[in-house]
Image: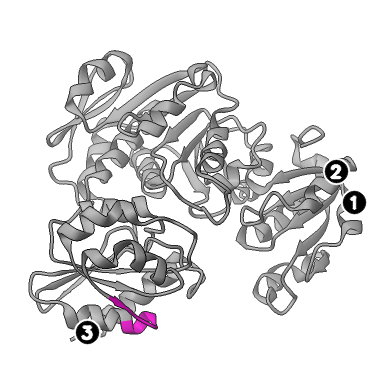
Amino acid sequence: MTGQPIVDPKDLKDKRVLVVGLARSGVSVVKFLRENGAQVTVSDHKSRAELSAALEQIDSLGVQYDLGGHTPKTFLAQDLIVLSPGVPPNLKIFDYARSHGVQVTGEFEFATWFIREPVIAITGTNGKSTTCKLIELFLKESGIDVWLGGNYGEPLIEYLRQSKKAKVVVAEVSSFQLEHCERFTPQNVVFMNIAENHQDRYRSMEDYVNAKRRIFQNTNQATTSILNADDNAVVELARDPAVQRGRIFYFSRKPSLEPQIMTIGGAVCIKDEIRVRTGPEIETYTVKNMKMRGKHSIDNVMAATLAAREHGADHDAIQRVIDTFPGMHHRLEYVRRVGGVEFFNDSKATNVHAVSRALDAFDENIIMIMGGKDTNLSYEALREAVRRKVKTLILVGEAKERINRDLGDYSETFLIGTFEEAILIAYQKSRIGDIVLLSPGASSFDMFDSYEERGNYYKELVTRFK
């Protein structure tokens, strides 16, 4: 990226800014720019008809359009280009613009230029959204003003559009958003785990990890990084000199690590008790009454507790949330019980690591529905868990043939044509005591606009069963 960031919204007045990609975050960026007097053009490879819903929100704002493709002349006529997270960063036209001195950045990085409040940034392959939500709830229950957004919830730019400012900003940060981060400096980095993901976007696992690694590039002595000691890839990242510039708290479900972690600070779960140290004293929290399913939920609680305590969350407030929070929609979400069969919605499980965590939450007798957009993932790591726990595997969507090649020999397996048929056959195959689990292991974009739409449709179909 060339040029210096704009640090005051007032300096956007009359600047020529191109917004590339008119998804939800793109619409928010356009609104923010126009509110601050910028001359805005939108470029998207989709047509006006395909973008009609988004265009309805900005058509009255005096915006110029470059739709149905990207025109080089349009790109060169700008002071700044802001990319939405879903836009691949390696298109040649971006390098072409940079070579002519035009500054190119991403929506998330652009938003951080104007935020003055401390930011807790949460990343990783899985567990980000739940950890973000827990941090928000811990702080709110403690009477601390907090705003949550980023990759989960509202785009980060929406924080800047509201007049009331929070004491703390909690931001979920995806690898797509981190690709453009150059100067982003969170006060806390929370890194949950690393597993294979988005292999349709990245040429290799190394490229994906390197994108995630960018969250550490501006750490300093005031930074506290909260890292998963049970994830070898995260521990390896912690050896990076950039991470070492600040303070590090580890969290772990391994009691053997308690002496080491309690010496330097962090959190350890031993049976039903979480022990936390962020200062001179060791605090304890019980997870005996926790409503969230899955051992990985303990990781989310530990990471969130460490981050929230860093910003003044109260011990008793944290415990109340642990005892009452039912978990997130579409993340091992209990739907209903029909004829002795329990249905769970884990539509957010869009990669192999997430499916593994879902299987870990149940003992056996699982009828599992998998499939979605094919993103070149390998499912071989699930073979043993499928063999032990899954009695019937029902596959649907673009990825069904790939999943069948990797897992079809380890369970009774059916390849189904439609999502509706898949749910119906899962119900027909179920018996008293079974678990019907939607845990796709693939993104939703072959059949649905989002994992939320997929999960909500699953719940709607399940409510029809008598």
Q: Mark 3 = which residue?
A: 465
Query: What is the C-alpha distance between the residues marked 2 and 1?
Result: 7 Å
Residue 340 lies in what quarter of the image?
bottom left
* Res. 18 image quadrant: bottom right
- The residue indicated by pointer 1 is 76
Q: Which mark is residue 102?
A: 2
Front one among 151 and 134: 151
The amino acid pointed to by label 1 is: Leu
Residue type at tag 2: Val
Look at 50% across and 22% down and name the residue there. Answer: 240
Please tell me how crowded label 2 is: few (under 14), some (14-19), or many (20+) other residues with Cα within 10 Å. many
Report whether residue 410 is seen: yes
Magenta residues, as a range? Answer: 414-421
- For mark 3, give the secondary structure: loop
- Indicate yes or no whether the magenta region holds residue 286: no
Which of the numbered marks, if any, corresponds to residue 24? none
